[in-house]
Image (tube, grey):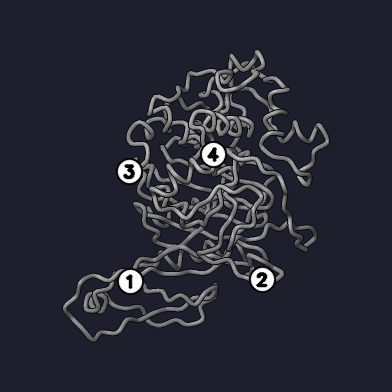
Amino acid sequence: MDERLRIAPPTPELLRQTGVEAHVRTRGRLLIDWPGRGRRRSLDSGRKVVRVHRRPSYTAGAAVILVALTGGLTPRVYAADDDRAQRSAAVLRELVPSPDGPGCAAAVGERGEVVWEAGRGKADLATGRAITSKTVFDMASNSKQFTADAVLLLAGRHQLSLEDPLSGFLDDPPAWTRQVTLGDLMRHTSGIPDYQDLLETKGVEVTDPAGQPEAIAAVLASRPQDPPGKRFSYSNSNYVLLAHVVERVTGKPFPAFLQQEFFAPLHLRMTLSPAVDVPGKAKSYAEKDGSFTPDASPWKQYGDGSVQTTAGEMVRWADNYRTGRVGGPALLAGVTRGAVGVGDVLRGRGIEAGRYGAGMLILPDSSLVHRGDWEQFHSTFKVSPDRNTAVTVVCNADAPDHFRAANRLMAVWTT
């Protein structure tokens, strides 16, 4: 992200004369050391862009001074006293030292508007395609929040209750499913083992075909490892089962339900498409001894992951945690109600305490945060305590310090 052209920043008076408001924008994802969907990988890269908003102005003729940044030719306008873009760019450069390998995208949103976004690195090493603000990534376990919110939405419509037993949504339920509630699934207190481990025990590797039916069958053939409701134990099986519950209640495919109830009403460019190479998507890369090879799986489970979108769209979505535009106050209350302590699971990443609610971890300061890891896609998503600011950092190869980068970006834009 070296600057190709640096011109003296415009003065506030010049911006007033031209009727221009400059908003520094960045797209990306924040990663925390959360037990995610699949194996851990992550990185960051791309370009920086600016969205310029024009106010009504009766003054004509003034020039606008632009700065072009590497990683893209999109012009950027800076306020004379605002260095947040430069500080954010420095965070991204530190996370992705070289623009020639896989990388990361990052974005910051304020009250539903993307105010800074950037990418650094390559989305496709074979073609040299760069990571930009438009690059799509698999959000992995950061998809869980949509599944949880879908359940909360149906609960608000009195179509189900979090106290309902799982058995009520299965055709031939094992006896143990009568003791597991939907709330247990949502908060990872069901005790159910992870379907990924169950499938691999049966000899089904992540490189072999496997979908939703295979995952659910493996889960129902097992049994909880702990009494339901006893303790937090993160398992992707919980959210695959919740997606099944939504389909049973609504009679609609889960991807279609998310599109109808969340993505379309909020005008989000998102899709739930497991194991699909959607347009503009980055490739996932595994690294060994300095060399990168593509890393992709044909598994097609959903509910626990598989939302495909950009970093910027994720921070736009985050504003629903402030407004409740979808779901209203009932959904917002449900995000944190009944959240359970996670113990010291995240202590290795500097998180001493937290509670898991509806697809999100609630930190002691009331921030919301989650991590996603699948193939070599890694993402961190974070929302500030006042719900006004959100950050996303997402990568297409493993990177060592996503959580710290996310926290640093949040600090740049909130302090």
Q: Nearer the viewer, mark 4 or mark 1?
A: 4
The vertical placement of 17 against 94, above or below, is below
Q: Dot 2 surroundings within 10 Å: few (below 14), some, or many (20 or more)?
A: some
Where does label 3 land, which residue?
323
Q: Dot 4 surroundings within 10 Å: few (below 14), some, or many (20 or more)?
A: many
Residue at 40% over, 53% down: 267
Q: Does any portion of residue 415 appear in the rendered image?
A: no
- Residue 95: x and y, percent? 59, 60
Residue at 16% over, 78% down: 58
| Disc 3 to disc 2, C-alpha distance | 40 Å
Q: Earlier in the sequence, mark 4 or mark 2?
A: 2
Q: Nearer the viewer, mark 3 or mark 4?
A: 4
Q: Earlier in the sequence, mark 3 or mark 4?
A: 4
Q: Secondary structure at mark 2?
A: loop
Q: Is residue 149 left or right of residue 400?
A: left
Where does label 4 land, which residue?
254
| Disc 1 to disc 3, C-alpha distance | 29 Å
Where does label 2 land, which residue?
100
Q: Nearer the viewer, mark 1 or mark 3?
A: 3
The residue type indicated by label 2 comes to: Asp
Q: Is residue 354 left or right of residue 167?
A: left
